[in-house]
Each structure stands twice: as structure tokens, then as C-alpha cells.
Image (cartoon, helix red, strand yellow):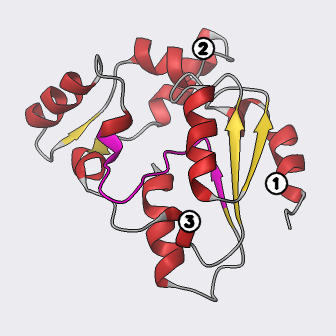
Amino acid sequence: MAGVALPQVACRHPGRISQVVFLAAIVLEPGECAMDHIPEDRRPSYFELAKASHDNTFSIGYEVAREIFFPEFDDAEAQRLYGCLTPQPLGVYLDRCTVNPREIPCPKRYIACRNDGALGFEACLKFGARLGGTVEEISGGHDVMLSQAQDLAEVLQRRSN
């Protein structure tokens, strides 16, 4: 969900950030919220789980998390990684964007994961295009930081102009 906050931070601190990199991130247009980009069949459970919690947060179940976040790992490792997830505040998904991502005052990069089960590759390409910066592709899923760290590090080390 860093893609939701990153444009606001970059626009509030011009000159202090030399480049922003969005990795498999939702990029919102002004007036949109992240919930607009969650598959419709998953949305009701987010609200139900948050309502049932004491702090309006939710956690998705293991089977869904395994499918969308950890498909590249064996079950034991996927279970371990699932145990590291923290509940998400529902409010982050409902807050409307107030910043145009194209107005971020520094170079922008978007790295789209070809096998992203959380957002989908086509959606990632669309989010990348919204930035008006460089869009790069990498093999792997939404978990690319964990499953293909070396490949990701090589992509990150290349600076865009």
C-alpha cells in the first residue's frame, strides 16, 4: 500500500527526494481510493473483517494470501511469510487521493511484476503509465522482493534518466 502514500510524501517534500520507485504498487488518480482497485469479489470481506476487529483492521486468510502474495514459495515458506503479515487498516483503502501522481517533482519509476497475483500485470502497467515516468518489467510475482531479490536489486541499481 506504499503506492497510496508515496505520491503525497514526495509532493510534500520537494527537493528532499531524488527519485521515487513504485514496485507492484497501486497508483491512484485524484479522487480515487485503493478500494476502487480491489477485485469486487474480495471487497466485502475487507469490510466484514475490519468491522469484526477491535481496531478496524483486517487480515486476509492464508489461502488467499498464498495465492496472491506467495505462489513462488513452497507451503512451509509461504506459511512462515504469512505469519509475518500484519493487519491492514481499512481506512487506508478508503481515503481518496488528493495528489496527482504525475506532479511528483522528481524522477519516477514503476516496476511491474509480470506474474503479480495481487494486482495483475495489466493493472500494474496501467498504474505505471499514470506516473508519466519510466515503466520497467521484472519476472516474478507480487512477492518479488522475497522471491527474486537479486534480480530486483539489479533493476533498482539501474537509474532511469
Question: Over which residues does the magenta segment extend?
Answer: 21-35
Query: Is residue 154 shown above or below 81?
Result: below
Q: What is the crowding at mark 1: few (fewer than 14 residues within 10 Å), some, or many (at least 20)? A: some
Q: Residue at x 9, y 31 (%)?
A: 52
Query: Is residue 86 shown above or below 95?
Result: above
Mark 3–mark 2 Cα distance, whole angstroms, equals: 41 Å
Q: What is the crowding at mark 3: few (fewer than 14 residues within 10 Å), some, or many (at least 20)? A: some
Residue 39 is covered by the magenta coloring: no
Q: Quadrant of residue 10?
A: bottom right
Rendering coords of residue 106 (x, y %):
67, 76
The amino acid type, in three-letter code, at marker 2 is Ala
Query: Is residue 43 shown above or below 71?
Result: below
Q: Which residue is mark 2?
A: 76
Q: Earlier in the sequence, mark 3 or mark 2?
A: 2
Question: Could you say which is closer to the camera, residue 35 or residue 125?
Answer: 125
Query: Is residue 21 shown above or below 19?
Result: above
Q: Earlier in the sequence, mark 1 or mark 2?
A: 2
Mark 1–mark 2 Cα distance, whole angstroms, equals: 29 Å
Q: Earlier in the sequence, mark 3 or mark 1?
A: 3
Q: Which residue is mark 3?
A: 102
The amino acid type, in three-letter code, at marker 3 is Arg
Q: In what element is the residue under mark 3?
A: helix
Q: Residue at x 36, y 31 (%)?
A: 38
Q: Which residue is mark 1?
A: 156
Rendering coords of residue 160 (x, y %):
85, 62
